[in-house]
Amino acid sequence: MMIMNTNYKRMTNRLLLAAIAVLMGTGCQKSWLTPKPESIYTPEQTYTTAAALQDALVSCERNLRYEWYGDGAPIISQMIFSDVAVDGISDKSGPAQDLNLDITPDAITSGNDNADHNRIYWYWEQSYYRLKYANTVLAYINVPKWDTTDAAQLAQRNALIGSAYFFRAYTYYELCNNFGNVPYAGKLYSSPKLDFQTVDRKVILEEMKKEMEYAVQWVPDGVPKGEVTKGACQHMLTKINLALGDFDDAIKSATDLINGGTYHLMTDRFGVDANDTSHNVIWDLHRPANKILPQNTEGLMYVIDLDGYKNNGDYGGGMSTMRQALPNWYKSINTPAGHNGMTDKVGVEYDLDTKYGRGIGRCRGTWYSTHEIWSDDPGDLRHAPGNWMTMEDLVYNEPSLKGSDPYYGKHLQLYTDDGKTLLCADTTRNWFDWPHYKLFVPDNENSTNNGGHTSWYVFRLAETYLLRAEAYYWKGDLVNAAKDINEVRKRAHATRMIDPGEVNIGTILDERARELYYEEPRHTEMVRISYLFAQTGKADYKGRTYNMNEFSTKNFWYDRIMDLTEFYNKGKFTIHGDEYTMSPYHVLWPVPQSAIDANVNGHINQNEGYNGSQNNVAPLEELPQD
Amino acid sequence: MKRTVLPSAFRLLGVIAILLVGRSVYSQNITVQGKVTSQGSTTGTPGVSVSVQGTTTGAVTDENGQYKLSNVPSQATLVFSYIGYKKVTEEVNGRRQINIVLEPESSSLNQLVVIGYGTTKKKDLTGAISSVNVAKLQNENRTSVQDALRSNIPGLSVGVVSTAKPGGSLEIRGQNSLNAGNSPLIVVDGVIYYGALSDINPQDVATVDVLKDASAAAVYGAKSASGVILITTKKGQVGKPIINFNTNIAIATMEINQPVYQGEDFIKWRTDVENSIHGFAEKPYQFNDPRQLPSDVSLDDWLAYDGSQGDPVDVWLTRLNFKPVEIANYKKGQVINWYKMMFQNAVQQNYTLSLSGATDKLNYYWSGGYLNNKGIVVGDKYSTIQSRLKLEAEVTKFLTVGINTQFADRDESGVPLNWGLIVNNSPYGSMYNDDSSDYRYSPQDDPGGGSRNPLLGPKYTDRLKKYYTLNSIIYGKVTLPFDITYTVNFTPEFEWYQYFNHNFSQDPDHQKTGGDAERDNHTIYQWQVDNILSWNKTFNDHHFEVTLLANSEKYQYWENDMKANDFDPSDVLSYHNMGAAVNASISSDDEYSTGAALMGRLFYSYKDRYMLTLSMRKDGYSAFGQKYPWAQFPAAALGWVFTQEPFFKSSWLDYGKLRLSYGVNGNRDIGRYSALSNLSTGKYLEINPDGTVNVVSQLYVNQMQNTDLKWERTAAYNIGLDFSVFHDIVDGSIEVYKGKTTNLLVSRALPDVVGFSNVQTNLGEVDNKGLEITLNTHNINHPNFTWNSSLNFSLNRNSIVHLYGNMVDITDSTGKVIGQRESDDITNKWFIGHPIDAIWDIKVQGVYQSDEADAAARYGQKPGDFKLQDVNDDGKYTNDDRQFLGYSKPRFQWTFRNDFTFYKNFDLSLLIYSYWGYMASFNQAKNRDGFPDRTDAYVHPYWTPEHPSNTYARVYSSDGGASYNVYRNRNFIRLDNIALGYTFPKPLLHKASIQDFKVYFSVKNAALYAPDWENWDPDWDPNVGPGPTPRTYTLGFNLTL
């Protein structure tokens, strides 16, 4: 018993000691609770090399791609807030048609940032995200150990800065020409900031000009497509110069680019279809495979998407150009014999879905962009058969008509043979022309042909010519303006050259519409021009003059759309009964209410005409320091 | 019961004598006195109520257990009752001295309740704890732990589940956190359990205790802010080995149907859709059947509306947007009922075999379970194999070791049909391709409208989705001198997960990519160590219990995922040969976290009358590891059995105890890396100058860091009253609580300008208060018929007190500043002074009728659109027009349970529960879900000029530029369960050497009353949303050998 007891005691003592050791050991070590992120890159640990900063720029490149890609791509919002297109989804409320009703600060939300509404919120939110990505490069640029006495290292460092500047300039250029005066995000924020103030757009654009002058100096050409090039910076600088009204500087920066020797308009046949005589150079210029060929010297800046990189760098689902911008041609169209004539089924005898793509008529070209600008030049390749599609180019393809309806396989007609009866029930959504050469992207992913993977031009040299033409126009040098416009026209084999005497802002906007449909941010550009009219007091082609004080009630943007549109404020209703309306104040988009609400310690201004603008305070006249 | 007065034979004789002689002979009154003691004790038991049956005469025993009753009829019956002990009825039979020994009652106050790192007797509780004896629910075929808890605990909400996999979310005493999780902490056999509840076989569970108040939960500090659920599994009983076999088979059927249009109804509806789209009758009868035109519309005119010719039926159906295949099927009279195809009567099987027993040195329990469920949606299936082994050996008299291990294999490979297609597919579509080679991709040849053949995807999907989990508790208990016990638990938990999926290229949705395959694996390994020292001592009337804990834990997670497509030469090998893919992408995610805790608790009671619990816990968690990993959680609680006070006299209150507690709990239920800045990566492409492709990575800051992030804290008071009245006919408890949650873990909305839409931070304060009432009544207690009821009622109110502390001016009507108030968070719809679940939206006042076209036009709307209240009448719908319309969580809930026993061997139980006073959005009333002109739809009313409605809008109604939801009340009362069991008589069974044999039948979701809700079941599975829910009929038996 004695032995038992001693053993017992010894054992319990040991256990007690062990227990205390465990208690002390696990509970109290300081390092025990240190967070250990194993699969997460943290900024301090990661942004330490040039390669990592380059990856930060890739975030900007990738973010930029969204502007043209996917269902209800943001670029469509640019187009429907302009003279070239309207939202053609005609069977429901929600799409931006009745702008007076639908475009309000409260309705511009993340919940409505989708194909069924509009992408104004996208342009707000993603712009600031992209600025964050660019500001990340600037925040960490001095962390890698640069030897700045080494010319190559200095050039590499400064090229990174210049590329980040490019994305800042690109983004602020769009913000300032979509929303006007906006808050300025000058750096990468690492703690919440809730006291933003609106800054005068001119102040921001002047800063961007400085940054782009730096970028032009340091960013090289000859880098992989998708990255920022010197040419892109020169082009961007030209746009900023124009926006600031610095026309001489704009002419200079554009001329430096055009005469730089690196970039040229593509005037000769090239690429995958070069030997196919049924096509032409305009067709070649927009083939998915050709855009990114080394011999393509026209592209200044691209966003990249390719077939065969699913989940590995591609844009999921493809860019969807055909779905967005082709008419809903397979619906509500009768043959003159009175039968439903069309089908979007693939694999039928006349497989129009595969040959041209399946559209839903969201981005509906206006009469202006589909007819008016083409009316006096039959030679223009951009409107030539094979490149340009009209509804009459299609044939009645519903297979059940074969043998029973004489019109099967015949070309579509809008009216019965006697011209009395309309054969299409919804000509807004189902019946309009489109630029096949640009929108046709073979779809190797979706079961219907929506528009697959292709790279897209962000900037190309043709636009540089048109920007310089515009600078000449503002300066009154119409001879040179006409010359630049005609450079673009010549390449398109247009037969009618523009005479200096007829150059006005309309001439330039017409040429932009011909050349840059579904490429340029049309609303941004028209607003920039409207600001110039208001700032310069120069009369437009109808002799109208503008000023800044009345900008939201009287502006060139609104007047031009009213000159040309057959939709907005023309008593035009969708079949669902929604009216196409628009007001002068829509020249600037509303700032999302959520941004104003969340900024509790400061005041972000609302644009005039929208609810909340009554609380505006004067915008800052210099850049905030933090 | 032990009788001390007469042997039973004499007593029997006495009774016979009374019966023979009759009452009147002995009807004189006497004084009776005596002493009441409890079993195993010689000192008297104070506070025992003694009463004369059928009268109001009664007394309570004094401090020495003595009682005295005068004026008692000599033939009366005395009733002795005391909480925690069996009731004793004793006939007086003329005696003047009656002494009684009380026997403890196992199922009442002496019942052991798990309180966290220990157990206590229910009568010693100082906190608010509710318990469920799961074994008692045998008849009801509770197939998951959550199911067992549903409607059995006041203040606990259990979400319903519609899938084959049983389960459901849990929430105790409402929502106190805005963004962090609100699910309670699970503790199994005394150790925190992070595994899946679905891996615990409910057949293995003996009891579940729910710690609801802060003081009870505070011993678990970390994560206990949302309450604690303590699960105790069964163990062996001393005696011969027992084999128990339980099996049941069930049929799940559709509880509610939500029909879609079929046949002619579909055509009529489509006619109205087109009329509505076209603003109603621009061209008379344009969309109506041309064979039934009125005399004033000629067929030629009708055809000429759009230049149509040919078969008028073709023209008509084309106008209704019918595709050729639909027209052909209409003419053939072929209608497909997609609805019927989606749903089924599903067979569910459940088997559990257990073996248990104990000797004085060894206790063992083993079980194996198999559950195989099909769901009411075709293709939904779930099966699991579960096994538990518990061994406990007393190695020496001071050392006990044990293991409690649980293995589960969960198979969730089912590919349910996409039942949502019932609204997308046309009844006039076709099942097969024209050449019958395969299922038709889109039955009505309109894939863009979302229609798909529901059978096609599953046919070409190959899926393996399995979880294997192994959860163990390995422990040792050492008895030390001075009544000290040391326990160490080591708890390793493993989870292995496989998700292998292939969508074959024969599926048109995956044709162009050449098939899409994925292999996703993860492994979780986490462990905890608990070191517990406890000391238990009684000195005379003083009882002490001290518990000390040191705990540490570690979590590790490793995930690999690969996705591939475009297989060469083909994808016939499914996901088994990923290397054959031309395109592949890989990703991985590893996570790691650590925690630690120290806890001390003191329980003290004096004379079993006054009780005090004090505890303090310190918790650390690595997610808060940058600056504030540690937090402290104190708690205190008092209990007072006031009916034991000598001065307390009541003839109707048998037992009363007041509890008062205060405690602080923490919430750490956020992402492991929420406080850190996180770079996101992704792939992008670049083209080298030579034309080759570069796959490059993007890298951006996705999450704003917050080094100051710390624990969310809830400090709460609880006042509880436990009582038993009317000689134990009614007992119950009332709990009132008030809690304050501060440092809320919120995802705060930021202006986008900063580059982040939100940041994880600690802000604000939310207050919760509530009331819970439990009443148990023993209505009838007759040998051949017993009836017991229990009623639970609970309500919880919360209110946001502070958010970010930003003050805004309050102005009067002239714009003059008259004060300040804290600003609301409109972005998240959180308002100071309002509950988290307040609904703030534009009010629907009705529907614009035909004569209100002008009023509607002001908002760009038309008759048939919802009429919204423009509060400030400015002609626009803005935030200024939003108002508080109601609540999205129930205002109160109640449960009413009735248990009956007939003829000893039959038991019947009925359970009803109700959630009341809450709303949910019902935007179906806008009648524009999806593409009404291309698909089918649920049968809901809609407005037309001929059949106006004030609650449903026209098809494709317009919102007039407003963004708002339509709401309906979700209120319901549900007959949740009817269960009937029959226990075979013991004598019969013993002949066959069977201990116990029971047969049972139950109906779950037997009936539902929901007066205002019109979209499936109002009590839906929050993970799925409104949809089909099952009604289950179960037949089973339980055999014990």
Image (cartoon, grey):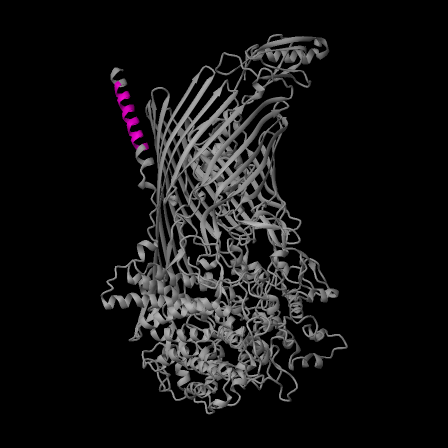
Q: Nearer the viewer, residue B81 or B129?
A: B129
Question: Residue B1035, image x and y in percent?
Answer: 54, 42
Residue extending farthest to the bottom is A495
| Quarter holding residue B984 | top right
Q: Is residue B566 magenta?
A: no
Q: Is residue A9 magenta?
A: yes
Residue extending farthest to the front is A621
| Quarter holding residue A422 | bottom right
Residue B424's place in the image compared with A240, above or below, is: above
Q: Is residue B653 left or right of residue B471?
A: right
Query: Is residue B813 in view?
Result: yes
Q: Nearer the viewer, residue B71 or B632?
A: B632
Q: Is residue B656 left or right of residue B56?
A: left
* Segment colored magenta: A6-23
Q: Is residue B655 left or right of residue B854?
A: left
Question: Residue A482, image x and y in percent?
Answer: 45, 87
Question: Residue B626, image x and y in percent?
Answer: 36, 45
Question: Residue B556, image x and y in percent?
Answer: 34, 46
Of the 4 image quadrants, the one containing the N terminus of chain A is: top left
Residue B376's place in the image compared with A327, above or below, is: above
Residue B675's place in the image compared with A205, above or below, is: above
Question: Looking at the magenta stretch, what is its main secondary structure?
Answer: helix
